[in-house]
Image (cartoon, rainbow, N blue to C red):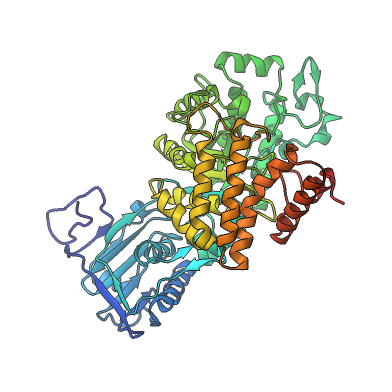
Amino acid sequence: MLPFRKITAARVLLATACIFVVSSTRASSALTVAIKGKTGYRIVIATNAIPSERYAAEELQRYLAKISGAKLPIITDAERPKPCEIILGDNAHLHVLGLKCDSDKLGTDGFILRTDHNRLIVLGGKPRGTLYAVYTLLEEKLGVRWFTPEIETVPKQKRLVLPGLNETQVPALEYREVFWTEMLRDADFAAKHRLNGHHYALKDKHGGRAVVYYPFVHSLDHLIPPELFKEHPDYFPLINGQRTNGYVQRCLSNPDVVQLAIKTVRQWIEKHPEVTIVSVSQNDTFKYCECAECKKLDDAEGSHAASLIRFVNAIAEDIEHDYPNVRIDTLAYQYTRKPPKTLRPRHNVIIRICSIECCFAHPLNACPSEENRQFRDDIIAWQPVAPLLYVWDYTPNFAHYEQPFPNFDVLQPNVRFFVEHNVKGLFEQGNSSPGGYGEMGPLRGYLLAKLLWHPDADLAKHTHEFCDAYFGKAAPIIMAYLELLEDQVRDGRVHAHVFDWSKKAYLNDGFLSEAEKLFDQAEQLAENDSVRQRVQVARLPIWYVKLVTDRVTGDAKAELLKQFLQVARKASISNISERGSLDEWAKKMGEK
């Protein structure tokens, strides 16, 4: 499959992967970039390179020096071309070769890696593609790994040889956000994993964020403030015959509500010109309006999403002329998850479907549970009618962050399922508390990042590599523990949900007993204090279940609680659940 076509020839060669326009097709070949710390190569960027391309050159220079000991100079395309160049980004040295970037095919994040005789071409779309190309080159071709912001591996090579390359990568997901603290706390780390979501502090050097929300979600209280109830009760939902205040939805069929929302959205966009997506989404409650107008439309369309979509469409239609680059995002969540029969979202509306009710012990596309069957039906129904489909997915136990949650087996099949159904944006909610962790939080965040760029990634390999780097000599035991955990649900009879209590069948006595034995072995194998602490933090979920289910009592419970809190506080863990702090929980558990 040829990735090129000739510029001057009358005959045009077309191919599915055609990204370059070239003067001739050349065979890819391996490049020897450095030997014993010496190099004849240099990195070439455009004189007017954007910040992310300059940063990409600096990152490539820095890591190649770590690998080989050779520091490649960075020059601009104002200098004359020479052999032995790494041509980074769209610049004049690329054009001399008769090559040109096709930004329509690469988009903002895609890229090409190609060897061309004694040159390496590292070319990406703007603003992030070239930086992502550098990180992919380092990771996939040279073996560099970034497991956490503090733990990276850089293989040393006296003879730095790059294989012949001719590949294109364009991500299936335009929006990729892993909402685990381990990814959120370091923007450089997020960029290395090609994450481009709203909550990362990505700067110009990273190519910025792919999406900028305002607000992020559950926005009705911001659109129609609760304090308006006194003068305008008709703005608020009719529930059981009464106009109702508090944390409720709004009467979305009221024309005045629509006009006030339009006015507010316009004010938001003017105040926040960086915004690319405005959230017009229901509050996190089932208290929707039952007035005659709302009910009439919802009943006719067979879904409470109908009144919401009509409301969202009115706002989207109003702003589309003045703000053509801003989209309106709304949720297909709980009572609005089923699409209306005939009402369709406008072209500038994003539907973000939420999987909160589902079983996460078994893949969404295979689990026989009624929750998963209904979710499958809903996402399949939205696929042909939503102009842009995003997913809000869930990956921890929100009621018990520090509790075993057997969902490792479903991470990959679920991401694949979303991509197969034309999902273009994926928000993977996790433990985003200040202290982070939760049950295997660093590992989950790492694996999810891999999947959001490569849904078909070798997840077993990534899991092994992470555990080897993070848990050292204890890695095989930790891997055995992960297998033990997943074995509790693999027969399909026991399901797992994101608010499971601590007496679920998969948290049985046999599992806890075997897990304790494994962690005893893992602690003994830990080769230093840092690894030992990571093993102890990984063990906390087992102790947590024993504590909250009174599997230990009396003095033994007091001692285990003391050990638990010592480990948790040393690791700076802040939250025991989505809304519960570690210190509050400690008091409830009887800390003295």
Quarter of image, res 109: bottom left
Q: Nearer the viewer, residue 139 or 108?
A: 139
- Location of residue 343 in the rendering, given as x and y in whole percent from the top left corner: 52, 23
Horizontal side, residue 524 vs residue 107: left or right: right
The answer to whether residue 551 shows anywhere in this view is: yes
Residue at 42%, 66% in the rendered image: 144
Residue at 55%, 28% in the rendered image: 494
Q: Nearer the viewer, residue 562 or 355?
A: 562
Residue at 45%, 48% in the rendered image: 451
137 over 446 or under it: above or below: below
Q: Nearer the viewer, residue 86 or 37?
A: 37
Quarter of image, res 204: bottom right
Q: Nearer the viewer, residue 573 or 211?
A: 573
Residue at 26%, 63% in the rendered image: 165
504 over 135 or under it: above or below: above
- Location of residue 90 in the rendering, given as x and y in whole percent from the top left corner: 35, 67
